[in-house]
Image (spheres, helix red, strand yellow):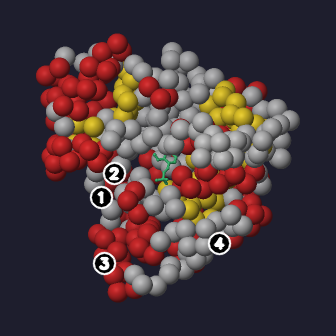
Amino acid sequence: FEALAQPGIRGLRAYDPGHDLVAWRRRVGPGLIELGSNENPWGPSAAARDAVLDCLHSLHRYPDPLGGDLKRALAAKLGVEVPQLLLGNGSHELLMQVGQVFAGAGDEIVASEFGFAVYALAAQAAGATLVRAPALPRSHAMPRGHDLDALADAITPRTRVVYLANPNNPTGTWFAIDALAAFLARVPDTVIVVVDEAYAEFVDDGATALSLLPSHPNLVVTRTFSKAHALAGLRVGYAVAHPGWVAVMERVRESFNVNLVGLAAAEAALADDAHMRWALARNAEERAKLSEALSSRGWFVHPSMTNFLLVEFGADTPMFEAGLLERGLVLRPMGGYGLPQCLRITVGDRDENRRLLAALDEMR
Ligand code: PMP
């Protein structure tokens, strides 16, 4: 089948979500501490849980194919128009489809070194060439973050798409919206710029690329309900862009791509601002404590505006990773990102973080 697949798919490695979580859940049981996937340990709004239960009587029905109610709620919340919105089965789906729709063989897709793994997959699946711009150096105030000048320099007449995340996964770093505006001024309007805002809600001054949409028809902002809204299991993401972009993307969208339960829960979660604010405050508090505790033990912690920390453990990284797993703690190894000396740690709740530090102290 390898030979039968279209060239871009041949040799492509599927997205690797880290450890074999199913095997570890079976082995360790309910005590497993999962800090490997940037999930939200505080869980979704009670209103979202209720909305899920309310769906039980209509599971035999197809969902609204266009997700009209959720789109109207999003439009009102974000101050955009409904035709600017596209829903996805997670933002992952939307990121992949941008590559498919706007790039092909002979085209280039630009992303940063240490950019989110899905951008490389999207480029390969589209049969396009991935061009990596170097990241900011380790010594920079935003160590290993996106270098917007380097990204602009990497654009050629063959570039169709640029992917960048703000804040970025796996580094946790971020950039100012003024800097993004200066970057966009250097990008031809024939290039689609995807600003992946999966972690935007965690940014403490609320800055977002959405404010640049009116002046940049080639800008696409993707978001997710998986992180701040804690609905990772239901797979709901969305993109905000020019209505013309949405209309083209609609052609490849699977007819009922967002499920009935996901639509209902996302709408309820969106309406419960207080719950999200509460979870964001808990995250900020726990992240500061965890970051301080790890730095004080001598490990380099990258600055983070997200719900995870990229931590440099140096040559001992494989030892810590294996030892933590043995103690029932799952973190994300970073070898696949070219950072084998680092582990990415999701900020857990107070007890999880305490147990993480205790396990690390046993191994030091
Ligand atoms: N973008 C970034 C930067 C992410 O970290 C993630 C999830 N890890 C996603 C997109 C995809 O999220 P989802 O498909 O759950 O919306």
* Callouts 2 and 1 close, C-beta under 8 Å: yes
Q: Earlier in the sequence, mark 3 or mark 2?
A: 2
Q: How far from the left and from the top, in percent, is residue 198? A: 50, 49
- Comparing labels 4 and 3, the label whose residue is closer to the camera: 3
Q: How far from the left and from the top, in percent, is residue 259? A: 47, 71
Quadrant of the drawing holding the C terminus: top left
Residue type at tag 2: Asn
Q: Would residue 230 appear left or right of 208 to someone viewing this image? A: left
**Residue appearing at x 50%, y 23% in the figure:** 338
Figure quadrant of residue 8: top right
Label 4 sits on a secondary structure element that is helix
The residue tagged 4 is 82
Q: Earlier in the sequence, mark 1 or mark 4?
A: 1
* Disc number for residue 119: none
Q: Earlier in the sequence, mark 3 or mark 1?
A: 1
Residue type at tag 4: Val
* Disc number for residue 40: 2
Distance between mark 4 and mark 3 Cα atoms: 27 Å
Q: Would residue 113 appear left or right of 325 to someone viewing this image? A: right
The residue tagged 3 is 53
> Does any atom of ligand 1 lie closer than 8 Å to the CB of label 3?
no
* Callouts 4 and 2 close, C-beta under 8 Å: no
The residue tagged 1 is 43
Q: Would residue 239 appear left or right of 219 to someone viewing this image? A: left
* Callouts 4 and 3 close, C-beta under 8 Å: no
Instruction: In the rendered view, tell whether residue 88 sits above or below residue 287.
Output: below
Q: How far from the left and from the top, in percent, is residue 148? A: 67, 31
Label 3 sits on a secondary structure element that is helix
